[in-house]
Image: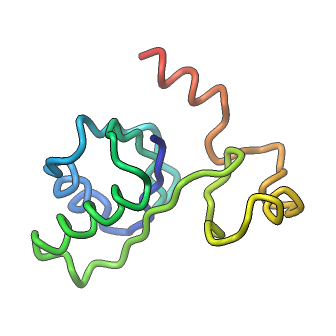
Amino acid sequence: MFVVLISARYKKILEWIEQCSQINSLSYVKRIGPKIFLYVDTDLTYNELVSSFKKTINQNGGGAYVYQFYTFYNGMIDYNDYLPERRKQEMDYYQKPNKDLSQEEIRCFLKK
């Protein structure tokens, strides 16, 4: 599953979440400013994964860190994950030709 971590202190957060016992592996895909694009090999759902990450971060003393995890919709960071799919299909943001994570980037990453 592809997720994005947005945080100024991403290096420390990555150290902590790599230790999360409920994931098989965590791979760095790319970075754009404070946005860290990750591939997580896990059987967890997105919500379970984020909950596990947050628990791990808090256990390591990162409760005061400012960070957020997001998933993707149509190649764009899904800042509006609470919206229904039908509404997202109507939004210009999700229909942009320049994607945050393109199909080509995904294919290249998965070939590695």
Give the residue displayed 47% in from the left and 54% down from the top: 4
Q: Quadrant of the image for the N terminus?
A: top left
Give the residue displayed 83% in from the left and 50% down from the top: 96
Q: Position of residue 95 (x, y in %)?
A: 84, 51
All told, the count of numbered labels is: 0
Q: Is residue 24 above or below residue 84?
A: above
Q: Is residue 87 above or below residue 26?
A: below
Q: Is residue 7 above or below residue 99?
A: below
Give the residue displayed 48% in from the left and 43% down from the top: 2
Q: Position of residue 46 (x, y in %)?
A: 43, 54
Residue 83 vs residue 54: left or right?
Answer: right
Q: Position of residue 105 (x, y in %)?
A: 59, 29
Residue 100 vs residue 68: left or right?
Answer: right
Q: Quadrant of the image for the C terminus?
A: top left
Name the residue furthest left.
60
Residue 50 vs residue 78: left or right?
Answer: left
Residue 71 vs residue 44: left or right?
Answer: right
Foreground pick, 92 / 11: 92
Foreground pick, 103 / 47: 47
Give the residue displayed 23% in from the left and 35% down from the top: 24
- Res 64 quadrant in image: bottom left
Name the residue furthest bottom.
64
- Res 27 quadrant in image: top left
